[in-house]
């Protein structure tokens, strides 16, 4: 099936071209995001493949439909950038990749916890600079401490079980408890109890109206002093301004972020020669106890291969007239 890929980075192209040897679709890749200027790049492709920051509002969907597009494949799990109802009305088929590697994000979460605790980001620079002093690098044993995991779906459940393996007491909060976590000894509690008891808090819930700014000044006030806070879920779950105040007050002792409220203006691009205009983000980077990665939790070879495989399979199913798996908004 002829497919035009928007927002295609070299690594996307490599993983899709590699997986496509088994499918034989006709793929074309452009680096540009899908927006009102780039929509005209669609020539005779009945399918487009898009990513998290591509715009798919009603006007764009209407335009793609008029250009002959029939299938829109999201090579990601989230779809808050898509007007699903408008797509359904236009008769466009939407597919996504709901879970490509929960292990990838869970393991990245552990990277942030371990690196922050033992100050690996600082130690790396120090040693390269010939500074072998240990002052300021003091960590703590995770074993015996308490972790709080908010959201124990695909990713959070793995994080909780890994943290159990480190010998931590693990508390969790989720409206739908995970039976395997419970069997592993994870104890489900309300948010207040989790906030009060946890030395390390890791967020793995989706961005919803309920979770918007879940970690605000009031939530932070309930936490232990010097708490470690990790967010690999979605930026809007944290109120970033409240977080900065808590870092200044030393309420937060360690902050690890893989996502940021305003990340669409920054992440996935090389802006190293630009002047970053986001002062809140820049302030975050000034703290020695803050470690930020640019939404790379998912970024493993295994996850990319799964994304490509699932997406290409959906194209084949669609082309052959079957119901593609992971279809969005089906009536
Ligand atoms: P999932 O849907 O499997 O699990 C989410 C869990 O959160 C569910 O168990 C749900 O019951 C729970 N939940 C919903 N509302 C809640 C609330 N108010 N309080 C506590 N728990 C609540 O999702 P998955 O795949 O585990 O993803 C988790 C997060 O990770 C999502 O925000 C997702 O967008 C993000 N993510 C981040 C990636 C990265 O590269 N950093 C990659 C993939 C996902």
Image: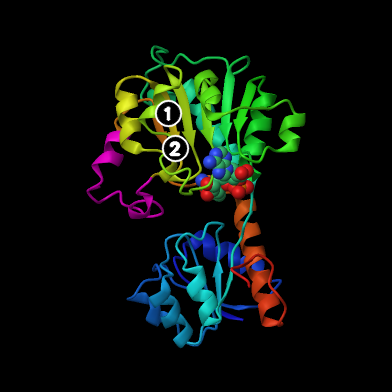
Locate the N terminus by quadrant: bottom right
Between residues 157 and 125, which one lies in front from this camera angle?
Answer: 157
Q: Residue at x 22, y 48 (%)?
A: 275
Confirm whether the magenta stretch covers residue 274. Answer: yes
Secondary structure under tag 2 reads loop
Where is mark 1, residue-wise? 219
Q: Which residues are magenta?
A: 261-284
Residue 293 position within the rendered picture, expressed as x and y whole percent measured from the top left:
44, 41
Q: Ligand 1 sits in which quadrant?
A: top right
**For residue 214, which numbered disc appears in the image?**
2
Does label 2 or label 1 sit earlier along the sequence? 2
Contact (CB < 8 A) between labels 2 and 1?
A: yes
In this picture the colour scheme is rainbow
Task: From this view, report whether residue 83 is shown above or below residue 281.
Answer: below
Secondary structure under tag 1 reads helix
Is residue 4 visible in the rendered structure shown here? no
Residue 17 position within the rendered picture, expressed as x and y whole percent measured from the top left:
60, 69
**What secondary structure is the magenta-colored segment mainly?**
loop
Task: From this view, report whether residue 130 is shown above or below residue 241.
Answer: above
Between residues 173 and 292, which one lies in front from this camera angle?
Answer: 173
Where residue 148 sits, quadrant-wise, is top right
Q: Residue at x 38, y 82 (%)?
A: 40
Q: Is mark 2 within 8 Å of ligand 1?
A: yes
Side of 175 where 273 appears, left or right: left
Where residue 144 sits, quadrant-wise, is top right
């Amino acid at each position: 099936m002829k497919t035009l890929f928007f927002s295609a980075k070299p690594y996307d192209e490599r993983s899709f071209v590699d997986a496509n040897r088994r499918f034989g679709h006709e793929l074309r890749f452009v680096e540009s995001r899908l927006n009102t200027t780039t929509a005209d790049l669609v020539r005779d492709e009945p399918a487009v493949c898009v990513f998290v920051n591509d715009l798919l509002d009603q006007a764009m969907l209407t335009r793609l439909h008029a250009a002959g597009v029939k299938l829109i494949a999201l090579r990601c799990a989230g779809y808050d950038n898509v007007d699903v109802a408008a797509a359904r009305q236009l008769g466009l088929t939407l597919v996504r990749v709901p879970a490509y590697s929960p292990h990838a994000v869970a393991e990245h979460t552990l990277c942030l916890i371990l690196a922050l605790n033992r100050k690996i980001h600082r130690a790396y620079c120090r040693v390269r600079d010939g500074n072998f002093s240990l002052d300021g690098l003091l960590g703590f044993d995770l074993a015996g401490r308490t972790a709080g995991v908010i959201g124990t779906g695909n990713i959070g459940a793995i994080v909780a079980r890994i943290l159990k393996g480190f010998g931590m007491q693990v508390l969790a909060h989720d409206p739908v408890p995970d039976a395997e976590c419970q069997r592993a000894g994870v104890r489900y509690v309300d948010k207040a109890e989790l906030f009060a008891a946890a030395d390390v808090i890791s967020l793995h819930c989706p961005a919803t109206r309920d979770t918007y700014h879940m970690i605000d000044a009031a939530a932070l006030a309930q936490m232990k002093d010097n708490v470690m806070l990790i967010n690999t879920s979605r930026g809007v779950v944290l109120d970033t301004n409240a977080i900065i105040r808590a870092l200044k007050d030393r309420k937060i002792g360690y902050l690890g972020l893989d996502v940021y409220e305003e990340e669409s203006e920054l992440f996935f691009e090389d802006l190293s020669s630009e002047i970053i205009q986001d002062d809140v983000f820049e302030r975050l980077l000034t703290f020695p106890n803050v470690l930020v990665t640019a939404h790379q939790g998912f970024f493993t070879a295994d996850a990319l291969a799964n994304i490509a495989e699932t997406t290409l399979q959906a194209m084949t199913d669609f082309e052959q007239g079957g119901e593609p798996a992971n279809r969005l908004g089906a009536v």
